[in-house]
Image (cartoon, rainbow, N blue to C red):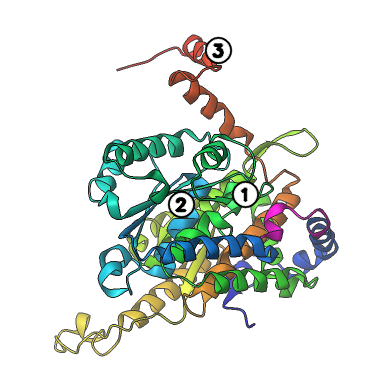
Amino acid sequence: MLEKIRFDFSFVFSPNISDGLTEDEINSYSEKITRIIDEIEADAPGFLEVPFDKRNIDSVKELAAKYRYFKDYDDFVVLGIGGSALGNIALRDSLNGLDWNRLSRDGRKGFPRIHVVDNVDPDFVSSILKNLDMKKTIFNVISKSGSTAEAMANYMVVRGIIESLGLDVRKHLIITTDPENGVLRKIASEENIDSLEIPPRVGGRFSVLTPVGLLSAIAGGLNIDALIDGAKNAYSLLKERNIWKNPAALNALVHYLYYTRGKNISVMMSYSNRLYSLADWYRQLWAESLGKKYDINGNEVNVGQTPVKALGATDQHSQIQLYNEGPNDKIVTFLVVRKFDNTVKIPKIHEDIDSLAYLGGKSLNELLSSEQRATAYSLAQNNRPNLNVEFSEICEESIGEFIFTYELQTAIMGKLLNINAFDQPGVEMGKKLTYSLMGRKGYSQFKEILEKSIKKYIV
């Protein structure tokens, strides 16, 4: 299968930017990158097995078939947060399209609308729930541990409504959780609620191509086989030991070398509204995987590159001034679509006004492409490194390839930084303090610590 995405690194190298990387620098890491890839394949982190584990995709297909691919439901609602939500949003927005929830029942062959409730903001949650017909809605509760406060609180709210209406929870709930452990697994088993398994060795931010993301995808009519095919193609490129033919390895090394030069911020700027949510997914993947206090030897290192998202051309008018003339501490990745689904022509009007006439007869497609190219060049002129990830088109294969390429890139970057890219100890204290403030049994000592440690300044 031909790659559906390609990487253009032209503006990360000298002489295209005056202090850019050189081919010799990249080549000097050739043996190290080969060792890292060998280590990753030998020690196979859980996500590496996902595209090749048929049980994941088969279990989703079987459950979807049982529900007639959810065509009897008007709405499919994901209850999750972080890795249990961001991938679902990215798949929906990029592949179903930004108008899916407006058109799906009437114009999309009966597939349900797809909602993702990924916060406990009461106004946000209410804005979704109040517009649902519960009799025609199914909820997918996703939490690997079964104890994620946000997902479980929303589950309890939803279940309370379902039961108050006298509905059978087994017709309106699907649980996605650990195969054996946790509260949700216990509930699913004891109450005979349909469930799917999150592979035990796959962390949330790497789980979008497991049942975590595939169920909402198939509910929206997406081709999940093609998603997996894209991921397999990305993996085939990982096996290429020539770093110049291995985009995940080359991009990881480019980001690492610029990080060592003080580029502490990684901007992902999408020149496609549909791909904008991919930047949200990337932010969690890059931040949670690589932001670490200690390296694998226990040394305090406080490493990590801060991911930022932007939208072109919109943010040319809000952020690019800073990127061009502010601190030179960023590397920018543009997401570029070579073939959009639609072409919008600009009519030839106001031909007597020079400042408008040049647009007539062109298209919005040409304008957006020109804006991206101009932005990339302006950054390069100011010695700001940037690169393109170019999608031949937005389709299941290209999105699957992008997702898995970036998961591979993150694993390689973790090795370069000498940290564990698969844990998140910095998240745990916040969870424990939340449990204590909410009165969870066994966590009272954290509330006492919190109250004793704060000297308050309230104005």
Is 249 covered by the magenta stretch?
no
Q: Look at mark 1 in the image and give the residue it sits on.
A: 262
Q: Nearer the viewer, residue 153 or 206?
A: 153
First-in-chain label (1 vs 2): 1
Quadrant holding the C terminus: top left
| Mark 3 crowd level (few <14, some 14–19, many ≥20, 10 Å Cα) | few
Quadrant holding the N terminus: bottom right
Q: Secondary structure at mark 1?
A: loop
Residue 304 appears left or right of 88? right
First-in-chain label (3 vs 2): 2
157 versus 172 height, above or below: above
Q: Nearer the viewer, residue 223 or 23?
A: 223
State if disc 2 and disc 3 touch (CB < 8 Å). no
Q: Nearer the viewer, residue 37 or 332?
A: 37
Q: Which kind of residue does numbered mark 1 sit on?
A: Gly
Main structural element of the magenta stretch: helix, strand or loop? helix
Q: Which kind of residue does numbered mark 2 sit on?
A: Gly
Q: Secondary structure at mark 2?
A: loop
Q: Is residue 371 visible?
A: yes
Q: Specify the segment rendered in magenta.
A: 41-50
Q: Look at mark 2 in the image and give the residue it sits on.
A: 326
Q: Which kind of residue does numbered mark 3 sit on?
A: Gln
Q: Which mark is residue 445?
A: 3
Closer mark to the observer between disc 3 and disc 2: 3
Location of residue 413 in the rendering, given as x and y in whole percent from the top left corner: 69, 54
Q: Nearer the viewer, residue 175 or 400?
A: 175
Location of residue 398 in the rendering, given as x and y in whole percent from the top left corner: 54, 73
Q: Secondary structure at mark 3?
A: helix
Location of residue 332 in the rendering, given as x and y in whole percent from the top left corner: 52, 61
Residue drawn at point x = 42 percent, y = 54 percent: 322
